[in-house]
Amino acid sequence: MTSITDLFGLSLPVVQAPMAGVQGASLALAVAQAGGLGSLPAATLTPEALRRDLAAIRERSAGPINVNFFCHAPPEPDAEREAAWRALLAPYYADFGLDPAAVVAGPARTPFNHELADVLAELPPAIVSFHFGLPAPDLLERVRATGAKVLSSATTVDEARWLDAQGVDAIVAQGLEAGGHRGHFLSDDLDAQAGTFALLPQIVRAVRVPVIAAGGIADAAGVAAARALGAAGVQVGTAYLLCPEATTSAVHRQALTADAGGDTALTNLFTGRPARGIHNRLMRELGAMRDDVPAFPLAAGALAPLRGKAEAMGRGDFSPLWAGQNTTGCRAVPAAEITRDLARGW
Ligand code: FMN
């Protein structure tokens, strides 16, 4: 079994999970400097912002870095669905004295495209990872031409086999415990998804490439368990959320440290795609999963003003509080310390 320390040239077999919205280059750099694989989430970055971040990282670290993109198919606008969504949110707008006509778009989540590929060609990272499958073959070819190794997440054995057949260099086996969006791309059936330690050994058996375990791994014991089940390394997200280098909001940090930090559920309310986050008011009052939410990523638009207003009052009622099921590893300590402590389990 090839460990990711050999595959990627790392000192420690720990990937800091890319986490759009709660981190930028600082967290990635801190993990890279500690000898793990730092990840830069690029799903909400413009090409200019990506160029700036990659240049800044390159100035401060010669180690490998992972850049992560979404590769979803952008949805057709659906005026009727959008109007129904806004009508559902109208009582909250009224409570805050907000004008429903003043709705602004939420942060854009642009799928990987040629402009972003241009930036990778200029400033090639050692690793490029994708969420929601892989981009079109011509785009994938451009990534490979930079010399980068390619990763993607699988939430089922079928997805892992599909990725293996496309020639990825490693697969992230992402269990149902994981925080944030499911990486699923072949089937929308959430019942088909297994927990990390059920999924991992099945994927290890089914594919030829190294498999990185993700979801619910929060400490050295979890890392040791993943290794025992055949993982080539681990990818950890939630445990980094309280680090000073993360940009996790105050309401998000507060929710993670409260008793209910581990009270998570899958919800599609915040973006239109199921993702795991800490239960909050919107999830409780509307139901965490609904059929009538605008398609990914459009649901975020109408929520943005509510989120802004509530956060200004110190409340996370309308914010996505993404977190995995296991929040026991969250500590407000430097990311290097989290990385080293995790690696002790290898
Ligand atoms: N995965 C991605 O591939 N891209 C992302 O932008 C992304 N954003 C995330 C944001 C948050 C706040 C969290 C908690 C997870 C996110 N994920 C994303 C999933 C992680 O990459 C990773 O698979 C997951 O955090 C692992 O499970 P854990 O949170 O239990 O450690």
Image (spheres, grey):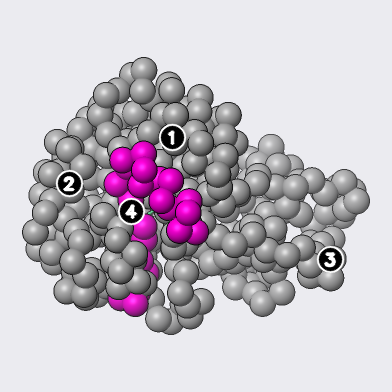
Sequence-first disc among 3 and 4:
3
The residue pinned by badge 3 equals 79
The residue pinned by badge 2 equals 7
User: Marks 1 and 3, how far apart in space?
Assistant: 38 Å
- Residue 144: say if magenta: yes
Q: Residues within 10 Å of mark 2 (few under 14, many from 20)?
A: some
Can residue 59 be seen? yes
Residue depth check, mark 3 versus mark 2: number of the one nearer the observer: 2
Q: Which residue type carries mark 1?
A: Ala
- Residue 90: say if magenta: no
On whether ligand 1 comes within 8 Å of the CB at mark 3, the answer is no
Q: Which residue is located at x 25 percent, y 29 percent?
A: 63
Can residue 66 be seen? no
Residue depth check, mark 3 versus mark 4: number of the one nearer the observer: 4
Give the secondary structure at mark 4.
strand
The residue pinned by badge 1 equals 121
User: Horizontally, is 250 left or right of 94 in the view?
Assistant: left
Position of 235 relative to 195 (above/below): above
User: Marks 1 and 4, how far apart in space?
Assistant: 17 Å
Q: Position of residue 175 (x, y in %)?
A: 33, 67
- The foreground one among 178 and 308 is 178
Q: Position of residue 137 (x, y in %)?
A: 45, 58
The residue pinned by badge 4 equals 151
- The foreground one among 290 and 182 is 182
Q: What residue range appears in magenta? A: 136-158
